[in-house]
Amino acid sequence: MIRSRKRGIEALVKVKPYIQLLTACALVGCTKPSVSPKRPVASAPPRTYTNPVYAGSMPDPSVIRHSGIYYGFGTTGAERTRDGRVFTVLGSRDLAHWERFGGALLPPSSDERIQYWAPEVTETGGMFYLYYAMGGLEPERFELRVATSVRPQGPYVDQAKLTDCESNRFTIDPFPFRDDDGQWYMFYARNFTNHDATTHPGTAIVVDRLLDMTQLAGQCQVVVRAHHDWTLYQANRHMDVYNATFDWHTIEGPCVVKHNKRYYCFFSGSNYQTTRYGVDYVVADHPLGPYSSEGDHPRVLQSIPGSVRGPGHHSIVFGPHDRFQYLVYHAWDPTMKVRWMCVDKLVWTAEGPRSQATTTPQPLPR
């Protein structure tokens, strides 16, 4: 981003003497030269982009905009960035062209076996908060934590654990949401082993109030449980920690926006490695619900056979000109080695929010 700005400034410096010459000619008159000097014609900047916008590993992308710059954060698992930190950090001015900044979080533990998932960053009162999940040393054990920094790109320093209202051993994918009245809420995913004829066991989403940016109220409410077959993660999954076997379903990656006075909790469902994985939503009149039921298929974003596999776990941001909203999501590369970062427009239709995964040139985000 800085390099492109420098090129623009250098071009302006080169053109300035020519502008001064034209001004002088207008005042005193100039003789037309016998041979017109050849000047390089500046090429117009590209007006389209093509997914992926970042062809490196960038699972679970979280994107915020601050002072005209977009900052993207991605899961690194048990790996570390080149500067020894956790979570990849990218930067962009247009959502389409990204540069790598380094890592976001100073590792809170020296144990290199620990995994770090699903970073989510927000800002309030001049402080930046990075929420994330940490664990992996035991089966189905992850906890929510929060770190802070005075800069959006970090480095972030761990501050506290956020405890689930029922001390659930598996809590992941935190998403902070600030309502218009200033109240903050935390949406996140956790495990449910109870089930009935219409509700499946599995990972699902709850919400709780934040007493401050580092403490939950301990009064969580269910946002959405799995009721449809498309969210199946694995059939006959034996889980030793529960001493039981389940047809396990997964609803994860909450992302909440307010639209026309209603609260839309977007989520990703199914097994992230499969073509069933996609994005759906539920809607309510209050952040704490109650929420409508989910769809019987991923209505917002889904795989395209032979082209896009496993799109989801996204952010929603406005484009540089605040005209449209965009989904920033991950999808598998053709070899299924890494999850790329992609961007596509979100459209609000009479049937609800919709998007379409693309692999062809698209107009630059606006």
Image: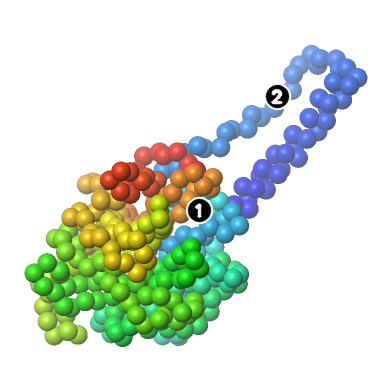
Disc 2 to disc 1, C-alpha distance: 34 Å
Which amino acid lies under the numbered mark 1 shown in the image of this protein? Trp
Instruction: Tell me what residue is drawn at x 50 percent, y 68 percent.
Output: 182
Instruction: Tell me what residue is drawn at x 37 percent, y 75 percent.
Output: 208
Please indicate whether residue 8 sits to the left or right of residue 359 in the image. right
Q: Which residue is mark 2?
A: 38
User: Where in the figure is residue 258, as x and y percent of width and height?
Assistant: 41, 57
Q: Which residue is mark 1?
A: 98
Residue at the right extreme, as displayed? 28
Please indicate whether residue 42 sits to the left or right of residue 235 in the image. right
Which amino acid lies under the numbered mark 2 shown in the image of this protein? Lys
Give the foreground label among 2 and 1: 1
Mark 2, secondary structure of its residue:
loop
Q: How many marks?
A: 2
Foreground: 263 or 360?
263
Quarter where residue 255 is shown: bottom left
Instruction: Tell me what residue is drawn at x 45 percent, y 42 percent.
Output: 49
Mark 1, secondary structure of its residue:
loop
User: Where in the figure is residue 97, as x and y percent of width and height?
Assistant: 50, 49
Quarter where residue 253 is shown: bottom left
Please indicate whether residue 233 sits to the left or right of residue 156 in the image. left
Above or below residue 171? Residue 37 is above
Query: Within 10 angstroms of label 2, few (less than 14), some, or many (20 or more) residues?
Result: few
User: Where in the figure is residue 309, as x and y percent of width and height?
Assistant: 27, 53
Q: Is residue 337 visible?
A: no
Foreground: 67 or 23?
67
Foreground: 5 or 354?
354
User: Where in the figure is residue 166, as x and y percent of width and height?
Assistant: 29, 84
Instruction: Tell me what residue is drawn at x 40 percent, y 72 percent.
Output: 186
